[in-house]
Image (cartoon, grey):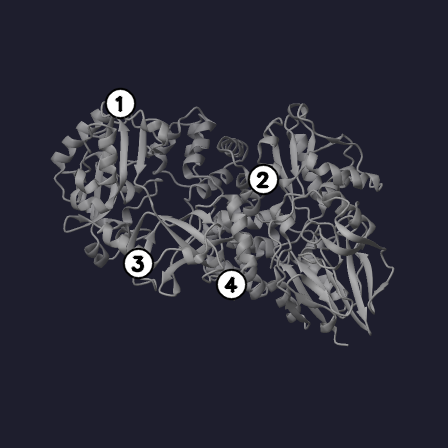
């Protein structure tokens, strides 16, 4: 069959008519395959949800145990058949439990990558390139100005700043699912052994990471009484807390923000960030291009982000490429308030 | 170059003025001559390299990268230097073991080489430096040569940091500044106490202006005619005209913008009018306006004369410049700034009576009996003495009678009370990504009002909204794009689908450039009307009626 008929673009998101399922739908559908737990990809209210055990657990933590009528577990590398279509989840390296989904039928192979990155991450399984005919990729950082430095170097800058200003608290804005825990894990890898403090909004997911055995060391929730006493400590909080009253109660706080956007000065300044840390859970420009080539695909579909640039590059590289213009993705990171539902789920 | 790059980088992220000042002072204290002097020159806009233009940088990057990818990246980042610094492909040799790269050039190397290098050698020289420097260094280099720092450091702040090196006042530095040249060895020697003050006193110095706060509800109660004088707030450009004798006895006149930029070259008509026999040795503070047949012209006309390095005789003839004076800062070598407003005003009136030059006139006081009378004057300037010039009045200024002239924006002595803005509901039609602070968000909005059954664009606005509203607007644009024209996105604008914006603006002019025939002055987004549908937006007739009312 033609690969293009295997998955089609609908207002609810990518849809497979043969298997009668959607992938990461932006509105409630009877059957959804979910790549990872970020709120723009994993929404509540579907009939049946097929996702990794970790993603299902994260959805239950965020939306409550009744987030879907039926939950089905997908294991990395184990194919399942849905209505004559073979689907296999493979690690995407984005956050804990994140997956790419390989959809196959009659020799046609399409990979829906979801969000992904290639840089090593102590908190999740690494991305595995999957050979395919059509690769569906994100494009969050798909401009050649985005080249993420090694995350360890950025953590080193955070530690240097802490050494320079021992009388100040270092507030690190980080998205609540994935980035917050990765920063904690990276700090431990860099040998930082003091307790790491966290905002209450980060607690639930961090607790889950700890229960899953991810080595994050001693992590403490900040209490109201603590705040004034945390000079010299590192505090992980949602980015939205950086500029609110909550963070002003800390001793002369230094605003840091861990995000790929911090590469652009205006973005850091827009948020009043003093210490921008370029740490991203998305592939940068070089990794997006390299990954597309590694999959040996003939065709690239680009979902959300800077579609134009990636489509142009792929076409220059001799591949067929088109933007999907899916609406509703990228909202969690833009709005930067973890656990909050994006107000607009319509195209 | 690395230290300068690091300074710029840290300044760019530092929100607090005091912390910026500390960073600058530390840098000047610990950096040797002549590097620090060139850094000061860069920060105060005193350097210019005649062959290094943005076009050259575009050519260089075009030779190294895909032009489409560059275009998209520039559109996203919103800053040419930053885009090139981030995108510049690192040369192969960087990663090769055993390859000893030369140390990156120093700031002085770069500045001195740039002054020596001819137009033909410049591209190769720049490319070599871009290869040698890291990202931060590349960014600093490109900012340096294009002269557009935009890191939130004014010339004034840099001079304040210099003053702080020794026990000097910023105004002491300001006073001798215009006679100095980079790398300012004599200036540093003086502030560090190693030498006398440079003997290059500027005979026609710039004196930093005193600024006002917007009048708020709570301030209004304190306004009374016993303590405050009122003046019209003119819709022009704040300028300072300054003149005096140099050490050789030569008479010299200069015109400065509000920020201390010397704009004399663009206003030869005013400079000619400042003569020994009428203006003398003095400095006045006033509003630059265009007067034709004795009437103040709209701001749109004044714009013809602004932002020019020089000016043609034709333009001078067509749009004669004029200064409406409201303060006298110095006269015959005497600094009048320590005097109270009331006393300065008397001196000013006497000065203007002697002056007699038609290019200068006195901005009248607006007498008022009480607060109600003041409010009435603001509402109806024509009826309160502004006469035919009422259109050029954008409110009233209130100055304490006992206020001394203090540089900066002290709270309390001076208030501006602008007239209420006009407002219309318009429909969002097109959006484009912004530059500078708003870069990478859809933040330039074109909006329209109804003419019959169609929407016609009436203006563009790129501020007025909060950061939170910007995120909402950006999201709306991305989710409701119906068409793309290069960087411009067309956004849904049907009768029952689209976004209504409440636009506030200061005035309306007829325009042949816009399809709608009207042009707004200073439009901004006052509110997002999520509650309204496009069919409820205003009609063009409403705007046309406003033009009629204003005339």
Rendering coords of residue B301 (x, y %): 26, 53
Residue behind mark 2: A273
Q: Chain of mark 4?
A: B
Task: Using the image, determine if residue A287 lies above or below residue B240.
Answer: below
| Residue appearing at x 16%, y 43% in the figure | B387
Residue behind mark 4: B59
- Measure how far apart labels 1 and 4 are at the Cα level: 58 Å
Task: Respond whether the residues carrying marks 3 and 2 are from the same subunit.
Answer: no
- Measure how far apart labels 3 and 2 are at the Cα level: 46 Å
Which numbered disc, 4 or 2, marks the residue closer to the eye? 2
Q: Identify the element where label 3 is drawn.
A: helix
Between A166 and B110, the one lying in front of the other is A166
Task: Using the image, determine if residue B25 lies above or below residue B151.
Answer: above
Q: Are marks 4 and 2 in contact (CB under 8 Å)?
A: no
Q: Are marks 1 and 3 in contact (CB under 8 Å)?
A: no
Q: Chain of mark 1?
A: B
- For this orientation, the residue located farthest to the bottom is A1
Which numbered disc, 3 or 4, marks the residue closer to the eye? 3
Q: Chain of mark 3?
A: B
Q: Are marks 3 and 2 in contact (CB under 8 Å)?
A: no
For the N terminus of chain B, give its image quadrant.
top right
Residue behind mark 3: B541
Q: Earlier in the sequence, mark 1 or mark 3?
A: 1
Which numbered disc, 1 or 3, marks the residue closer to the eye? 3
Residue A175 appears in view: yes
Residue behind mark 1: B402
Rendering coords of residue B231 (x, y %): 23, 34
Q: Are marks 3 and 4 in contact (CB under 8 Å)?
A: no
């Amino acid at each position: 069959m033609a690969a293009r008929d295997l998955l089609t673009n609908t207002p609810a998101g990518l849809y497979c008519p043969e298997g009668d399922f959607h992938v990461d739908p932006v509105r409630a559908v009877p059957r959804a395959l979910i790549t990872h737990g970020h709120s723009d990809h994993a929404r509540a209210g579907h009939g049946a949800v097929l996702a990794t055990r970790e993603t299902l657990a994260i959805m239950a933590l965020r939306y409550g145990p009744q987030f879907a009528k039926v939950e089905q577990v997908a294991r990395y590398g184990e194919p399942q058949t849905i209505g004559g279509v073979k689907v296999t989840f493979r690690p995407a390296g984005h956050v804990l439990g994140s997956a790419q989904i390989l959809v196959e039928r009659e020799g046609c192979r399409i990979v829906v990558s979801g969000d992904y990155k290639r840089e090593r991450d102590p908190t999740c399984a690494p991305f595995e390139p999957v050979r395919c005919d059509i690769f569906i990729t994100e494009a969050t950082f798909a401009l050649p100005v985005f080249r993420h430095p090694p995350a360890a170097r950025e953590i080193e800058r955070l530690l240097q700043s802490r050494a320079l200003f021992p009388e100040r608290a270092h507030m690190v804005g980080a998205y609540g699912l994935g980035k917050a825990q990765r920063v904690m894990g990276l700090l431990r890898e860099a040998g930082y052994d003091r307790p790491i403090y966290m905002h209450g909004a980060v607690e639930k997911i961090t607790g889950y990471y700890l229960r899953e055995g991810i080595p994050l060391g001693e992590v403490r929730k900040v209490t109201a009484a603590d705040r004034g006493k945390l000079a010299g400590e590192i505090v992980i909080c949602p980015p939205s807390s950086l500029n609110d009253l909550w963070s002003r109660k800390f001793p002369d706080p230094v605003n840091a923000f861990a995000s790929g956007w911090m590469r652009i000065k205006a973005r850091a300044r827009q948020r009043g960030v003093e210490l921008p840390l370029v740490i991203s859970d998305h592939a940068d420009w070089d990794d997006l291009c390299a990954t597309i080539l590694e999959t040996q695909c003939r065709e690239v579909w680009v979902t959300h982000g800077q579609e134009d640039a990636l489509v142009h590059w792929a076409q220059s590289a001799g591949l067929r490429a088109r933007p999907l213009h899916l609406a509703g993705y990228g909202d969690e990171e833009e709005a930067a308030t973890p656990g909050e539902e994006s107000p607009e789920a319509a195209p | 170059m690395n230290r300068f790059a690091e300074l710029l980088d840290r300044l760019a992220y530092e929100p607090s003025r005091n912390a910026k000042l500390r960073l600058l002072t530390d840098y000047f204290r610990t950096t040797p001559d002549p590097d620090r002097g060139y850094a000061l020159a860069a920060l105060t806009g005193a350097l210019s390299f005649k062959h290094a233009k943005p076009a050259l940088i575009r050519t260089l990057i075009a030779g190294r990268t895909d032009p489409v990818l560059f275009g998209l990246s520039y559109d996203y980042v919103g800053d040419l230097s930053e885009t090139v610094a981030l995108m510049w492909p690192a040369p192969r040799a960087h990663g090769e073991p055993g390859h000893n790269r030369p140390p990156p050039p120093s700031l002085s190397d770069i500045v001195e080489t740039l002054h020596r290098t001819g137009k033909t050698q410049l591209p190769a020289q720049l490319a070599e430096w871009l290869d040698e420097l890291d990202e931060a260094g590349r960014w600093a280099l490109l900012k340096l040569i294009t002269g557009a720092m935009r890191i939130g450091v004014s010339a004034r702040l840099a001079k304040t940091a210099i003053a702080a090196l020794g026990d000097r006042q910023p105004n002491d530095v300001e006073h001798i500044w215009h006679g100095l040249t980079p790398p300012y060895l004599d200036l540093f020697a003086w502030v560090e106490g190693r030498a006398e003050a440079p003997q290059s006193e500027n005979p026609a110095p710039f004196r930093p202006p005193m600024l006002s706060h917007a009048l708020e509800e709570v301030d209004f109660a304190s306004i009374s005619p016993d303590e405050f004088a009122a003046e019209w707030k003119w819709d022009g450009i704040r300028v300072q005209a300054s003149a005096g004798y140099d050490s050789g006895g030569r008479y010299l006149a200069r015109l400065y913008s509000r920020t201390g930029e010397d704009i004399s070259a663009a206003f030869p008509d005013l400079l000619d009018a400042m003569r020994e026999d009428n203006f003398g040795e003095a400095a006045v503070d006033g509003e630059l306006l265009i007067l034709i047949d004795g009437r103040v012209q709209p701001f749109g006309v004044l714009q013809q004369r602004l932002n020019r390095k020089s000016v043609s005789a034709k333009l001078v003839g067509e749009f004669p410049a004029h200064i409406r004076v409201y303060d006298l800062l110095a006269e015959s070598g005497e600094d009048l700034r320590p005097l109270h407003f009331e006393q300065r005003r008397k001196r000013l009136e006497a000065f203007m009576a002697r002056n007699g030059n038609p290019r200068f006139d006195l901005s009248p006081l607006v007498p008022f009996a009480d607060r109600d009378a003041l409010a009435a004057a603001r509402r109806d300037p024509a009826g309160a003495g502004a006469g035919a010039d009422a259109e050029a009045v954008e409110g009233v200024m209130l100055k304490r009678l006992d206020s001394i002239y203090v540089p900066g924006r002290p709270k309390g002595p001076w208030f501006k009370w602008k007239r209420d803005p006009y407002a219309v509901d318009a429909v969002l039609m097109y959006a484009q990504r912004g530059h500078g602070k708003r870069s990478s968000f859809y933040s330039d909005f074109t909006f329209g009002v109804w003419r019959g059954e169609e929407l016609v664009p009436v203006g563009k606005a790129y501020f007025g909204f909060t950061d939170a509203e910007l995120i909402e607007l950006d999201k709306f644009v991305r989710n409701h794009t119906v068409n793309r024209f290069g960087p411009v996105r067309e956004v849904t604008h049907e009768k029952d689908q689209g976004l209504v914006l409440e636009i506030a603006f200061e005035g309306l002019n007829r325009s042949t450039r816009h399809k709608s025939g009207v042009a707004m002055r200073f439009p901004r987004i006052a509110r997002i009307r999520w509650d309204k549908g496009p069919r409820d937006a205003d009609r063009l007739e409403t705007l046309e009626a406003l033009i009629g009312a204003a005339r």
